[in-house]
């Protein structure tokens, strides 16, 4: 099956040669072609170029008229928690009233609140709730997404979450990466016995996850009040025995050693970084670990933003993800995350778009097939309404610009 998109005002996010990620000054490179076409064959990008060179239209093609819109690669969202039970707007009100994240947790809120709610739902109920969010993010231009567990906090409920993630993989054209986050917090049954919880996670949870092949990666919340670097290292080392590479929640609440343990264990990404230090930036130089900023979290919680500008100027690549979850970021709108990256972290529009496409694809280990317009990559892209320039995308931060969405070459 062939799909030809014609009358594209600007085709953006092009890679002419394979590239795994963009770093430093490369992040300002957003290759574009004006007055372009895009050819898709069997769900994969087959060709693109100036419309003057467009192949002849024949009966084997489905033709899509972009009507002067811009075409970009779909957003890749490398950090979400969209399998959860219900909302937590009361905690939102608590925050307005001055309670901190830690105070809300001590009152029974936060992650443990979501764990209690999730325990009460069936797998089918969780799946139906999650699919509402999946349809939402697809409509907003996301074509690849990492979904983490972490609201189970016992073996049975963590497996339930991961099975729901697998059902999402199997029932949509969205590219889904699954991450086991049993070390999101200590489950209620182990209150005051964190070391025992870590032992249980290593000796019971990880083997069960591996036996059913339910996760691509393993994540740990390595931060003040959560898991220590030593505990994090133990978990990541054991995960590698099962073929699951590590990822880290780190440096969100304090200078907690999250970056150091991520680099030491060659984690694919280290995410949050609101409390990142200059030493952390130096540690990441030359590493394979992608620093990932979550600007929606900083916006919603009134926290500092990760120092993305400083990271880029130091030669690092930066990824931007939504952190869509019920407590600290109830939004999966990647366009808004791109706008926040420009407004609050001082990224150029091209840098922010690269951070939300090719670099977030790298942070999921899929940048060989997603994250840019490149021959041989999966044809995940969206067509905008006519817009004056690429810079308009983060500038018009609440304007709905997406007109049509395609995943693996099929309109959604």
Image (cartoon, rainbow, N blue to C red):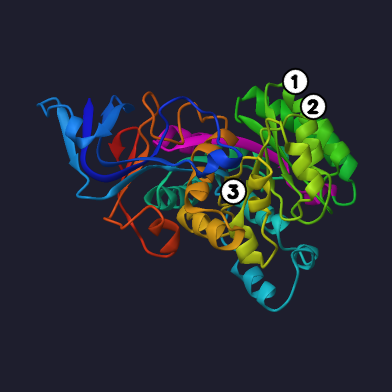
Question: Which one is in front, 390 or 156?
Answer: 390
Between the C-alphas of marks 2 and 1, the distance is 7 Å
Residue behind mark 2? 237
Q: Do the residues labelled 3 and 1 touch (CB within 8 Å)?
A: no
Name the image quarter holding residue 210. top right
Using the numbered discs, state the Cα–Cα distance from disc 3 to disc 1 in whole angstroms: 25 Å
Crowding at mark 3 (Cα within 10 Å: few <14, some 14-19, many 20+): many
Q: Residue furthest bottom?
A: 97
Q: Residues at badges 2 and 1 in contact (C-beta under 8 Å)?
A: yes
Name the N-terminal-most of marks 3 and 1: 3
- Above or below: residue 367 compared with residue 87: above
Mark 1, other Cα within 10 Å: few <14 / some 14–19 / many ≥20: few
Give whichever of 191, 183 is nearer the camera: 183
> In the rendered image, which residue does mark 3 sit on?
81
Left or right placement of residue 361 versus residue 1 in this view: right
Q: Which residue is denoted by mark 1 in the rendering?
A: 241
Regarding residue 186, the answer to whether it shows in the image is: no
Name the residue located 38 percent from the left edge and 23 percent from the top edge.
376
Q: Which of marks 3 and 2 is in front?
A: 2
Choose the circle earlier in sequence order: 3 or 2.
3
**Is 287 within the magenta?**
no
- In the rendered view, tell whether residue 376 sits above or below residue 407: above
Which residue is outermost to the left?
59
Where is residue 318 drawn, in percent x and y? 61, 44
Residue at image position (39%, 29%) is 374
Q: What element carries label 3?
A: loop
Looking at the image, residue 55 sits to the left or right of residue 135; the answer is: left
The residues colored magenta run 166-190
Label 3–label 2 contact, CB within 8 A: no
* Residue 24 horizontal/vertical position (percent): 61, 41
Assign a secondary structure to mark 2. helix
């Amino acid at each position: 099956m062939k799909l030809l998109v014609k009358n594209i005002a600007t085709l953006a996010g092009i890679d002419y040669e394979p590239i795994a990620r963009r770093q430093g000054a490369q992040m300002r490179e957003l290759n574009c072609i004006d007055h372009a076409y895009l050819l898709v064959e069997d769900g994969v990008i087959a060709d693109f170029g100036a419309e003057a060179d467009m192949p002849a239209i024949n009966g084997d093609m489905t033709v899509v008229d972009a009507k002067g819109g811009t075409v970009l690669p779909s957003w890749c969202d490398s950090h979400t928690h969209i399998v959860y039970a219900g909302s937590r707007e009361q905690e939102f009100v608590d925050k307005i009233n001055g309670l901190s994240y830690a105070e809300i947790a001590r009152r029974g809120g936060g992650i443990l609140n979501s764990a209690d709610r999730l325990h009460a739902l069936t797998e089918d109920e969780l799946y139906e709730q999650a699919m509402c969010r999946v349809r939402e993010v697809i409509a907003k231009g996301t074509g690849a997404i990492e979904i983490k567990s972490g609201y189970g906090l016992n073996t049975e409920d963590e497996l339930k979450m991961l099975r729901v993630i697998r059902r999402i993989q199997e029932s949509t054209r969205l590219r889904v990466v699954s991450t086991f986050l049993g070390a999101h917090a200590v489950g209620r049954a182990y209150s005051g016995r964190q070391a025992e919880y870590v032992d249980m996670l290593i000796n019971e949870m990880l083997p069960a996850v591996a036996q059913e092949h339910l996760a691509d990666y393993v994540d740990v919340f390595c931060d003040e009040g959560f898991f220590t670097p030593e505990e994090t290292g133990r978990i990541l080392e054991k995960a590698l025995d099962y073929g699951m590479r590590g990822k880290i929640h780190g440096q969100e609440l304090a200078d907690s050693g999250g970056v150091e343990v991520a680099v030491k264990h060659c984690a694919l990404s280290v995410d949050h970084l609101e409390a990142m230090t200059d030493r952390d930036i130096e540690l990441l130089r030359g590493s394979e670990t992608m620093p990932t900023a979550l600007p929606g979290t900083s916006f919603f919680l009134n926290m500092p933003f990760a120092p993305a500008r400083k990271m880029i100027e130091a030669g690092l690549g930066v990824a931007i993800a939504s952190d869509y979850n019920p407590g600290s970021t109830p939004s999966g709108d990647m366009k808004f995350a791109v706008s926040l990256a420009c407004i609050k972290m001082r990224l150029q529009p091209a840098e922010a778009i690269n951070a939300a496409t090719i670099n977030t694809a790298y942070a999921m280990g899929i940048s060989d097939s997603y994250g840019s317009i490149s021959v041989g990559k999966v044809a995940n892209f969206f067509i905008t309404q006519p817009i004056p320039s690429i810079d308009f995308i983060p500038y018009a931060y609440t304007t709905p610009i997406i007109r049509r969405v395609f995943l693996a070459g099929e309109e959604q």
